[in-house]
Amino acid sequence: MAEVLDFLTGRPLVLLTGAGLSTDSGIPDYRGPGAPVRTPMTWQDFVSGPLAQQRYWARSHLGWARMGTAAPNVGHYAAARLDPTLLITQNVDGLHEAAGSQRMVALHGRVADVVCLTCRRTSPRTALQKRLDALNVDWMARHGQAALRPDGDVDLDATSDFVVAGCHECGGPLKPDVVFFGENVPPDRVARCYEAVDALEDAGVLLVVGSSLTVMSGLRFVKRAARAGTPVVIVNRGATRGDDVATYTLNEGCSDFLASLAER
């Protein structure tokens, strides 16, 4: 690890983080060592109709009660101290923001916000949580022990009696303001990330921490950096789809590594 820390010290950085960074905050990831096989809600599923939306919100209402109280860990605070040229996160938990990171792009949005699919108004998740509590007074007591999933919902099959709340303004269906699997990342976010990666050239480094790079939303930046000759360093528990183009790969814990780098 010392060789990698030496290599990174003093260089401009773009930092790309994934779910592995939030596991120390009690939020599980999809593909880390020992993670069970999970099937996430897709965009196509969610917009298929009220039953899918009921299933999602029944689970998400429980999950938010725990994800919404998760706290940043030492890795998040270290990332804020590093103050990279740009912090790109694939996580929707808001923990980088809570730790004080400023120059950042939440690539997949934030689960703390809700958007209406009809009128496109956004609102805070905390307000929706209170409405759902009022409509489902015993839901938490009956199902509060269900296992938390990476996207903020839980493992739960019995959802048919859950009452869903519509948009407070127009009554339309509500969706967390995050990018679901099968949905496209907004082009302006991608463009800002490309711009930061391109500006690194060969003097800076793209540092990937806690992501398996399984989905193209993050892998595209690794491929772009590699094509330009920009060094890529990947720190992750387990192999990633970017290992073949990386300058260095480390099978290390995310939080400890970032804390060590910040100390440099």
Image (tube, rainbow, N blue to C red):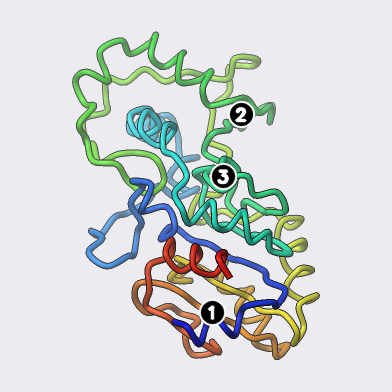
Which type of secondary structure does the marked residue at label 3 adopt?
helix
Residue assigned mark 2: 116
Disc 1 to disc 2: CB gap under 8 Å: no
Quadrant of the image for the C terminus? bottom right
Circle nearer the N terminus (3, 1): 1
Disc 2 to disc 3: CB gap under 8 Å: no
From the viewer's perspective, is the residue at label 3 or at label 1 nearer? Answer: 1
The foreground one among 59 and 257 is 257
Where residue 116 appears, as percent x and y from the top left, is: 61, 29
Label 2, residues with CA under 10 Å away: few <14, some 14-19, many ≥20: many
Which type of secondary structure does the marked residue at label 2 adopt?
strand
Above-or-below relation of 167 to 29:
above
Give the residue drawn at x 70%, y 49%.
Answer: 102
Residue assigned mark 1: 5
Residue assigned mark 3: 99
Amino acid at dot 3: Ala
The foreground one among 53 and 131 is 131
Give the residue drawn at x 72%, y 79%.
Answer: 204
